[in-house]
Amino acid sequence: MSQLLQAAATPAGVFQVERPRVIAFVNRKGGVGKSTTTINVAATLGHNLTKHLTPEQRAEYQCEVVVVSVDPQGSSLGWAKRIQNKELLPFDYVDASLEAGLIQDLIEDGYRYILIDTPGWTPPDEDTWDGMDDSKQATVLRAVLDMADEIIVPMEPEALCYEPTMWTVERTMRAHPKPFRILINNCGASENDVDLRNLRRWLAKRPHWPVFRSTIRGYKLHSRAPEQGVVCTEYPENTIGLKARGDFADLTLEIAMEPASRSMAAVSS
Ligand SMILES: Nc1ncnc2c1ncn2[C@@H]1O[C@H](COP(=O)(O)OP(=O)(O)OP(=O)(O)O)[C@@H](O)[C@H]1O
Ligand SMILES: [Mg+2]
C-alpha cells in the first residue's frame, strides 16, 4: 500500500495533497461486466505504472491502484485471490462489502486510483428518492455513490439491459449526481453488429448520457480469465489476445487522460 501522498506545490507556495481518483463501476443490472472491467482496468493501470521498474524497484513497489469490492458476492476479490502471478500483481484489493467507510481510509492512504466494484442487484423501491430500499447493499451503494468522483456504467448491447440501466442513471444516479460515462461492454467485434447498432441508436436518443469512445468487445479470453487466475495484461500475444488487451489499453488511456468532468454529471433531481 502506498504511503506516499502526492504532494505538489501550488503557484501560491501552498502544498496541496492530490486526492486519488475514486471511480465506481455501477449498474443495477447484474452481469453487465462490472467486475470484469474493474479488474482489467486495475491491471492495465497498474501495468502502465510499473512496466518501467527494475526488478529491485518492483520488489519495493507500493501499489498505486486498489480494487475495492462492496459486492457481497465478492467476484472480483475471488478473482484477484486466484491471480497466480502474485509478484507481478500491480494492484491491491480490499473487501469493503460490510463497511464502506473503509474507502475513506483508503482515500487517505496515498493511492492514485481507487476502483470500486459494486453489486449488480439492489432491491428496487419505487417510493424512495433514489429508487433503492434500506437494505445493506443499498446503504453501501449510496455511500459509494457519495464518495466516488466518477461513475463508469458498463452496459451490454442487449435489450434486457436497457431498462435497468435507465433506472440506474435516471433514478439512482440522478439522486446522487456524479460525472458518469456509459461503457459498452461485451459487444460484437464490428460496428455493424446489429445489437451494437441498436444500442448506439438507443444511446443517441439520450444525448445527455456521455459514452466512452472505447468499447470492450466480447472475447472468451475475458470470461475464462477469472477461473484461470489471469488478467488481460497476461493474455497471449496472438491476434485475439492483443485485441482483447488492446480494448482495455484504449479504455484505460481514455480514463487516465480524460477524467470525467462536471459536464458529464447526471442532472440533479
Ligand atoms: N467483454 C467480455 N467478454 C466476454 N465475457 C464477458 C465480458 N464481460 C463480461 N463477461 C462475462 O459476463 C459475465 C458477467 O460479467 P461480470 O461478472 O464482470 O459482471 P458483473 O456486472 O460484475 O456481474 P454482477 O452484477 O453479478 O456482479 C461473466 O461470466 C464474465 O466473464
Ligand atoms: Mg460483479
Image (cartoon, helix red, strand yellow):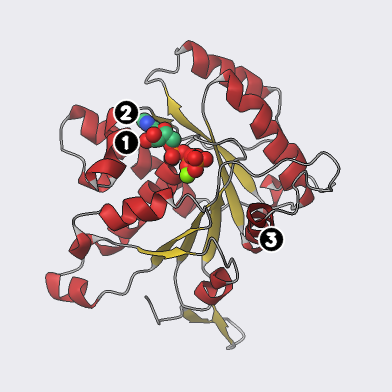
Question: What type is the residue that disc 1 sits on?
Answer: His
Secondary structure of the residue carrying numbered label 2: loop
Q: Where's the N terminus, which quadrant?
A: bottom left
- Rendered position, 123 above or below 45: above
Question: What type is the residue that disc 3 sits on?
Answer: Asp
> Which residue bears the numbered disc 1?
222
Q: Is mark 2 within 8 Å of ligand 1?
A: yes
How far is mark 3 from mark 2, CA to CA? Answer: 33 Å
Asked if the residue under mark 2 is in contact with the one under mark 1, i.e. CB atoms within 8 Å, the reply is yes
State the image coordinates of residue 198 (x, y, percent, origin top left): 57, 15
> Which residue bears the numbered disc 2?
219
Residues packed near mark 3 inside 10 Å, few (<14), some (14 to 19) or many (20 plus): some
Q: Which mark is residue 264?
A: none
Q: Is mark 3 within 8 Å of ligand 1?
A: no
Which is more N-terminal, label 2 or label 3?
Answer: 3
Residues packed near mark 1 inside 10 Å, few (<14), some (14 to 19) or many (20 plus): many
Between 136 and 223, the one lying in front of the other is: 136
Q: Is mark 1 within 8 Å of ligand 1?
A: yes
> Which residue bears the numbered disc 3?
146
Which is more N-terminal, label 3 or label 1?
Answer: 3
